[in-house]
Structure formats: structure tokens, C-alpha cells
Image: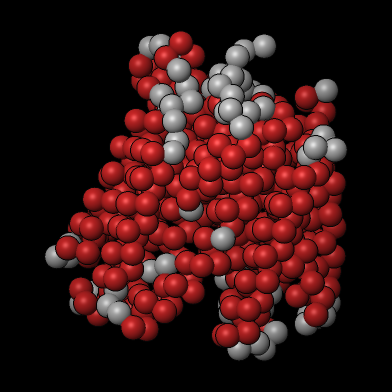
Amino acid sequence: MRSRLRLPGAADRVVLVGALGIVSAVSPLATDMYLASMPHMAEYFGTSAAAVQLTLTTYMVGMALGQFLLGPVSDVLGRHRLMVTGNVLFLFTSVAVVLAPSIGLVIALRVVQGVSGAAGIVIARAVVSDIADGRQAAKLFSILATITSLAPVVAPLLGGVIATVAPWQAVFWVLAGFGLVMLACSVLVVPETLPSARRHRGGLAAAARNSWIVLRTPSFMAYALAFALAFGSLFSYISASSFVVQNVLGFSALAYSVVFAVNAGGAILGSLVNARLVDRLAPATILLVAVGVLCAVNVGGLALIAAGITGWPTLVQFFVSPTCHGFILGNAVALAQSRVPGRAGAGSAVIGLLQFLTGGLVSPLTGLAGQHTAVPMAVLMALCSTLAMTAALVARRLTR
């Protein structure tokens, strides 16, 4: 068995995973926080809403490509310097966006910001894989998911307040401040967890070879697809929930915020319970049960919505589904990473790429039938969770 770097105590693990959670929260903060300020940006630059929305698209593209590129590179160069460099670049691009004279330059800067922000996400997962395996890794990934789950709750609320009282530049000043916090975490808290003796030799060619080996590992891909498809189910809900809760269920904007926060709390609760449950049950068993419940709830929800039955049954589905993800995401990542020992960066990169591709694919599909129906969302939630269940079963069979 290959040796692993072990942290000396529980307190150090808590501090490290907390720092990794802060670094991993960059994506929802840099996407959700400035949505309410988009009209102000369009007015400021004298451009169209589509041009401003392109700043979100380019950021997501940069985030996906950055994870896929930087993960394998960290297996060759190490974790610490790459994470610090990414955080420095994220800080500088956040300030540059504020000072940009044109929307075209903002669009270009958001690509760079996405790539640099990806460093924290992909390397954070690799660091956890470096320092832990098995049940301990599943527990740490669950704690990491708990911390990062707070960001989608805080970001829209904070962004709405900023859009109400300050110009759009204030959002990116806040992001620059967050970039400074990330930089401090990476410099002062996150150590180098991949010693030189365990790094892959051969430069970029070795990084590319690692990615290819990971992609050709069936058990890893099955668990990674289970993770990505489960995330696709979650993102289908996130993308359409505002329209469904307000236009279909008839709730106010304020009530929707409360519903969304409560459901996010379910995801956090699931992650916390899972962190304790993995001490007693195998992560693979928890994953299969959770994906099974997710599939049953979403298929049942689709049947009810197709029959015209909404209201409280839909709200129950919206709570149970994110709660299931608290038991799925951490275990799926831990199990996937365990299938590619020695290639944690490349494994994390592939997981991140599949996650963002799936989320980007389902997001526009939820609105195909307009803003006053929940059917496309329900179909995608049921389809993604069914496919995730299939992938989890295949993964279990392959690991046997």
C-alpha cells in the first residue's frame, strides 16, 4: 500500500478542510453573486443583456477547462504552488474586471478568472485524496461538501443586497476580497500534500498520460458519472426552481428564497449525517441507498407533476432531493478517487469536467417549455437520477 501524508490530529484536519471548503466555494460565489447586477452592467457598458450573460458562459467554460488542465498538472508539479498561483490570478482578475473599459475585455477576463478559480476546486479534491482514503476520505469529502453548500445560499442573497445599494463593481470588489481570503488560506493553511517522491515525471506529457489512464479506468468513470449525473439532477432543480416555485406553485420571491434556503439546509444536513454514518456503513452502500431514494423520489415527482399534481408534493420532492445529494456527492467522489491511486489530480479534473458539462447541458433544457411548467425540470431530474443509479450499480459491479 502506498504511503500517505497523515495530518497529526483532528483539529488540524478541521482547519485544513475548512480552508479547502473556502477555496472550493469560488464557483457559486463568482457566478451567483453578480446575477442581480447584470442589468446594471448592461447599462454601464451600453450593451445587450446577451453580451453580459456571455460573461457567465465564458466563466463556466474557463472553470471546466481549468479543472481538466490543472488537475493532471498538479500530479506533476505538486499542489501548493499551483493553488497559490491560481488564487493570485483570481484576485488580480477580479480587480481587473472592475477597471475594465469594455464588456469585451470583461468577457475575456472572466475566462481567465474561471481557469484560475478552477485551481482551488480541483486541487482541493486532490488534497483530500492525498491525505485520506476509504471511510476517512468519504468523511472529509462530506465535510467539504457541507462547507461549499453554504455558498449557493449566501451568494444570491448577498448579491441581491449589493445590487440594491451599490453599483455592479461592488460585487467584484467583494470577489477580490474573497480572493484575498482564498490566497491566505492556500498560503498559510494548505500544505504541500504531494511530496516530490510521489509526483509523476515527464512534464505535460505525463499529465496528459495520467488523464488518459483515468479516462480508461471503467470503475472510476462509473463512479464519476454517478457523481456528475446526480449533480445534473440537482442542477436541474436549481436552474428551474425559481420559475417553478413562483410561477407554478404561486409563491412570492421572498417565499422562494426561504424555500431555497431550507432545501439547501437539507443538503447540508445530509452531508453532516453522512460524515458520521460512514464510520458504521461502507460508503458504497450509502451511495447506492441514497441514489435509490433520489431516483424513487424524482420518478415519483415526475409522475405527479405529469398528472397535474403539484403543491406540497413538489415541495417535499424539492427538499428530499437535495438532502439525498448530501449522502451522494462526497461518497461518489471518494469512491471514484480510490479507483485511481496516485492520480488524484487527474481524477479530480475528470470529475470536475463531467460535473460542469452535465450542469451546463441540463440548465438550458429546463426552460424548453417556458416559465410556467415544471415538466421539463421533472423529466431531467428523473432521467439524471435514473442514469446515476445505473452508473452506481455498474460501479459496484466493477469494483467487485
Up/down of 79 relative to 39, above or below: above
Q: Is residue 65 left or right of residue 106?
A: right
How far from the left and from the top, in percent, is residue 386?
A: 77, 50
| 31 displayed left or right of 43 | right
| Residue 123 as seen in the image, left or right of residue 370 | left
> Is residue 102 visible to the viewer in this orientation of the structure?
yes
Which residue corresponds to the image point at 56% horizontal and 21% vertical from the top-left? Answer: 5
Quadrant in which the C terminus appears:
top right
Q: Give me the residue at 57% from left, 85% from top.
A: 253
Image x and y of residue 18, in percent: 53, 47
Quadrant where the N terminus lies?
top right
In the image, residue 42 above or below residue 387 = below
Residue name at image x 25 percent, y 80 percent: 43
Q: Vertically, is 341 above or below 364? A: above
Judging depth in this view, the residue of 96 and 228 nearest the camera is: 96
**Left or right: 14 as drawn, with respect to 97:** right
The answer to whether one can see residue 386 in this image is: no
In the rendering, at what x and y percent does residue 323 appear? Answer: 74, 59
Identity of the residue drawn at 28% across and 44% down: 88
Residue 356 in percent (x, y) is at: 52, 48
